[in-house]
Image (cartoon, helix red, strand yellow):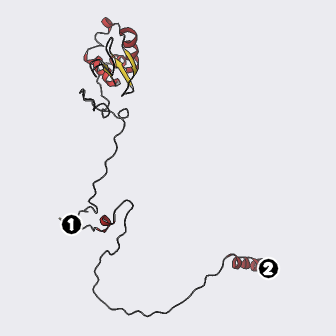
Amino acid sequence: TSATNTTTATQNKKKRGRPKKKTTTSTTTTSTTTTPRTTTATTPKTRRGQSKKAAGTTATTPVHNGLVTPSPVSNRPLRTRRQSSPAATTGTNSWSSSPNHSRKKKKKTFHFQSEEEEEFYNFAKLMKKLEQRQRWKYKPGKLHSWNYCLPDRPGEGKGIHLVDYFTEEDEVIHYCMQNSFYEKRHELGLE
């Protein structure tokens, strides 16, 4: 008897928990006639960010040599990706002196003859030697993070980029390689 009491109690809870929905039934008569069907889009669905005109255009899929090639639905041009920061990219550099090239530059790949030469051109060590023994300076720039200035030459405001000062580490290494700093390291005191 206790088992039947608990089942009826749970059934009562279920009945009390949810109100019943009223259902209404109506009878309507419809007549059907057979006519040939044509498919037309009367109310096209729009995707987010798409105009109703673009959504209403239908795409035809042309068949070439048995292969179906999709055609675009919209005539809107594709979006382009943002370019990554110059510090994160690697590649070759253009060493032009135009002011617009510095933001889009890629890191220069250098080829060294030996491990000693590669270690010599390590930027942190090289700049420390240039600063202490050759009187190079580096200071915060106005348009760039740092300016690496040759001895007794003006910086970013008055000097000429790639002649009096450099704005990238790659530029300093490239300048030192062009002027054979590794081969002249004993003469220059950069051992």
Residue 166 place in picture, x, y as percent: 32, 22
Q: Does residue 24 appear to the left or right of 8 in the view shown?
A: left
Residue 148 falls in image quadrant: top left
Give residue 80's mark. none
How many numbered marks appear?
2
Q: Nearer the viewer, residue 16 or 1?
A: 16
Q: Is residue 47 above or below residue 29?
A: above
Residue 112 place in picture, x, y as percent: 29, 21
User: Quadrant of the image for the N terminus?
Assistant: bottom right
Q: Which residue is mark 1?
A: 62
Report whether residue 9 is seen. yes
Residue neighbourhood size for the residue with mark 1, other residues' Cα within 10 Å, grouped as few (<14), some (14–19), many (≥20): few
Q: Is residue 59 above or below residue 138?
A: below
Q: Which residue is mark 2?
A: 5
Q: Looking at numbered disc 1 in the image, what kind of residue is underneath it?
A: Pro
Report whether residue 190 is seen. no
- Residue at image point 21% right, 66% down: 62
Residue 177 place in picture, x, y as percent: 28, 18
Residue 43 falls in image quadrant: bottom left
Residue furthest front as drawn: 158
Q: Nearer the viewer, residue 34 or 111?
A: 34
Residue furthest left as drawn: 65
Residue neighbourhood size for the residue with mark 2, other residues' Cα within 10 Å, grouped as few (<14), some (14–19), many (≥20): few
Return the disc, 2 or 1, that comes first in the chain's sequence: 2
Residue 53 place in picture, x, y as percent: 30, 66
User: Quadrant of the image for the C terminus?
Assistant: top left
